[in-house]
Image (cartoon, helix red, strand yellow):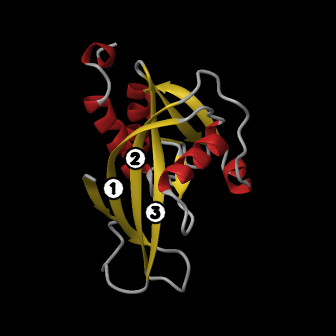
Amino acid sequence: MKLLKQLIHPELTSREGRTLRRHAARGIVLREDEILLLFTERYNDFSLPGGGVDQDEDITLALKRELEEETGARDIQIKEHYGFIEEYRPHYKPEFDLMHMTSHFFTCDVAPKLAATRMEGYEVANGMRPLWVPISDAVKHNRQVMARKEKTMGQSIQRETFMLERISKELIPVEQNEN
């Protein structure tokens, strides 16, 4: 497994204390120069589909579950573990001082047609929806949100933009990146 980046939230003063540890599985699903992403209206950002791994849940089964729920993807084929990012950030619950999130990224293939999503209530309330997007458009959009320091900007936008830029450089053929 390859560590891609370690992110430490600027408001975090220490990595010591009561720590909530979470693991997440996130999918990289490409079609030519487009990528399957989630757009979340509340945060005005693009992110890779995926989410938390339940205790004692196999990480690849968690990824398949999350992709099906959030994007309607079917016939999911997990190809390889691309790498992981570690994040340390403040936590909003009083019983914890910080969260240590490890996000594992996997390249995947899915059936050409997406089915209906089965999102959780908070995802629906946040205006989350799956979209096929040219990866360069998603990077540009997220970069603009960060440059404007939008008040609604979520904590994950740095992780997601870093990954989109890396995917664009490493997994998208050069000629498609130039379009």
The answer to whether residue 128 of the structure is visible from this angle is no
Where is residue 144 shown, x and y percent of the image?
40, 38
Q: Earlier in the sequence, mark 1 or mark 2?
A: 1
The amino acid pointed to by label 1 is Ile
Q: Disc 2 marks which residue?
A: 105
| Image point (53%, 75%), residue name | 92
Marks 1 and 2 close (CB-CB < 8 Å):
yes
Mark 3 nearby-residue class (10 Å; few <14, some 14–19, many ≥20): some
Decide if residue 168 is on the left or right side of residue 40: left
Q: Earlier in the sequence, mark 3 or mark 1?
A: 3
Q: Earlier in the sequence, mark 2 or mark 3?
A: 3
Mark 2 nearby-residue class (10 Å; few <14, some 14–19, many ≥20): many
Q: Give the answer, above or below, for where 93 lies relative to 106.
A: below
Query: Could you say whether the residue bearing mark 1 is in a helix, strand or loop?
Result: strand
**Which of the two residues, 81 or 20, is positioned nearer the viewer here?**
81
- Identify the mark at residue 23; answer none if there is no mark: 3
- Identify the mark at residue 85; answer none if there is no mark: 1
Where is residue 54 shown, x and y percent of the image?
57, 64
